[in-house]
Image (cartoon, helix red, strand yellow):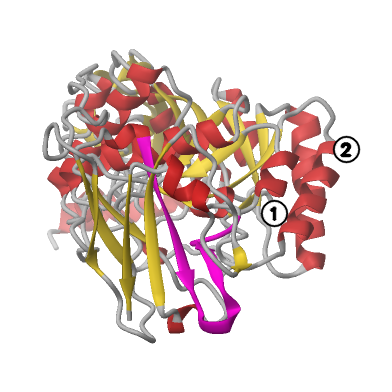
Amino acid sequence: MKRIEAISWFLLAVGCVAGLVGCGSSPQAGGGGSQGSSISAVSVACTPAGIQANQTSQCTATVSGTGSYSSAVRWSASGGTVTQGGVFTPSGAGTATVTATSTQDSSKSGATTIAVSAAPVAYQLYGLDYSPYVGSQSPSAGSTISDDQITQQLELVAPYTKMIRTYTCTGLEHVAPIAKSLGLGVYLGVWIGPSDATNQAEIADCVSIANSVGVEAIVVGSESLLQNYVTPQQLIAYINEVRADVPGVPVTTADTVTMLENNPDVVAACDFVYVNYYPFWEGVALSTALADLNAEDAYLRAAYAPKEVIVSETGWQSFGSDVGSAAPSAENAAYYFLDFESWAQAGQRKTFYFEAHDEPWKGTDNGWGIWDETLTMKSGMMAVFNGETVADNWTCGATPGGSGSPILQFTSVPALGSSALLEGQEWHEPPANYYVVVYIHVGSAGWWVKPYAANPNTLINCDGSWSANIVTGGSDASADTITAFLIPTTYSPPILEGASSLPQELYTNSVANVTASR
């Protein structure tokens, strides 16, 4: 060190100790700023602070400090991307956060939030089934879901639907209040499982929510009958309990069309019919899926008129394994969504689509979402919200085989002892005007209507094909004779449970019949 530099440093040190000068870093320590300078705060402002998903926002940072400091910042963002010039581009609807961090002092940063709404849509769904779980989250694992996550997801879907339907209250108590704060109606789900103690706790939570925020309807149980969690009588008791605790709010249960058809006492306890239609799980090809759904819906509406029938669930998987003739793919899922919503609009129906986004915890029973688990809308789904529709392909038009004398055939008769479905075909009559009713003869036990006494009629597809479950209990698989009748929808067939013979009225009122012995 040169002599003059040594003297300077000596004088500086003495001055520092004496308090005559500041004791800053040596100018030769290099690295960032002059002696005595510091960053005190960073603040961020974005204009506009609320944007749509197809817009951008310009953000600026203000850096405060003392001495000679740098005003340079490094930008970062969640819910989108931001350039180093501060231009924010959202990745989708929801709440985004833009952050500016000082390049001189990384411990100093500022942030602001931007509300991102979806781009305006031409068509809104009536309802959307919603559950918040994404990634590794799972209700079976007791995952805790934050209010921020629920808010972000519901802000995303709010522009696209008028209502949401939930599945449980315990652990997700804030879903309904957050949804209501965003202007969404709520069909509040009460999860009913096999434990009465758990069910009672769930009911208490849901009743408290319903009475505090107000909901449009309460759904007591989701496929609780199908899963055999409770008996019909137990479910009716839960429905009546909730109705008494939340007066003035419609109460129902959600289940498959078969369960609702076979349990008229449960339907009688409900204020409206809330039904799951899944042509996918029935193995129906995409080309005839809506025709199949429409036939089931027409039957249920006729059976329980004048009660309103609302669709609680329907959908199509975007990935997974085939089920019969139903093939999952992104393209097929988008088409089914468009086809179903076209049907709903044409009939001015109240429907809920399953579901908002994919839930990985379901394993192979995943891929039903309009959005994927990252909350990105799937390819092709936007067509519905753009107001696109397809022409009626759900009303049976042409008569199978054209004009001619009515014919009823068996196309596949299960072998003795088998539980396979009985399959058949009708010709020369409009399927919408007829049902098939099946009876089996089981030795000394006599004749029995199939599939059920509460559900004796079998629907006919638009192409005239039909199938019926003839093994629903007892010794059904050992039936020695099977007879089917093609009957008008205006005729109520006799309910046989052990009859010695088939009554003559069946032959008189039917237009065709067929018998097979085995």
Main secondary structure found in the magenta portion: strand
Q: Residues within 10 Å of mark 2 (few under 14, many from 20)?
A: few
Apparent side of residue 303 relative to residue 5 in the rendered image (left or right): right
Q: Which three-letter amino acid code belongs to the residue tagged 2?
A: Ala
**Residue at left offset 33%, top offset 56%:** 10
Q: Which three-letter amino acid code belongs to the residue tagged 1?
A: Thr
Is 439 in the magenta? yes
Q: How many numbered badges does the structure rendering display?
A: 2
Apparent side of residue 416 relative to residue 493 in the rendered image (left or right): left
> Sequence-wise, which precedes: disc 2 or disc 1?
1
Q: Nearer the viewer, mark 2 or mark 1?
A: 2
Is 197 in the magenta? no
**Residue at left offset 22%, top offset 45%:** 464
* Range of residues picked out in magenta: 434-453
Q: Which mark is residue 362?
A: none
Say what secondary structure mark 1 lies in: loop
x and y percentages locating residue 17 in the rendered image: 49, 53
Q: Is residue 342 above or below residue 26?
A: above
Q: What is the C-alpha distance between the residues marked 2 and 1?
A: 20 Å
Say what secondary structure mark 2 lies in: helix
Quick one: quadrant of the C terminus?
A: bottom left
x and y percentages locating residue 362 in the rendered image: 40, 64
Residue 409 visible at all: yes
Q: Which mark is residue 170?
A: 1
In the displayed orientation, state which residue is furthest to the right. Answer: 244
x and y percentages locating residue 396 in the rendered image: 24, 31
Residue 76 visible at all: no
Q: Quadrant of residue 75?
A: top left
Q: Circle 2 sits on which residue? A: 244
**Residue at left offset 28%, top offset 18%:** 119
- Mark 2–mark 1 CB contact (< 8 Å): no
Q: Is residue 503 above or below residue 356?
A: below
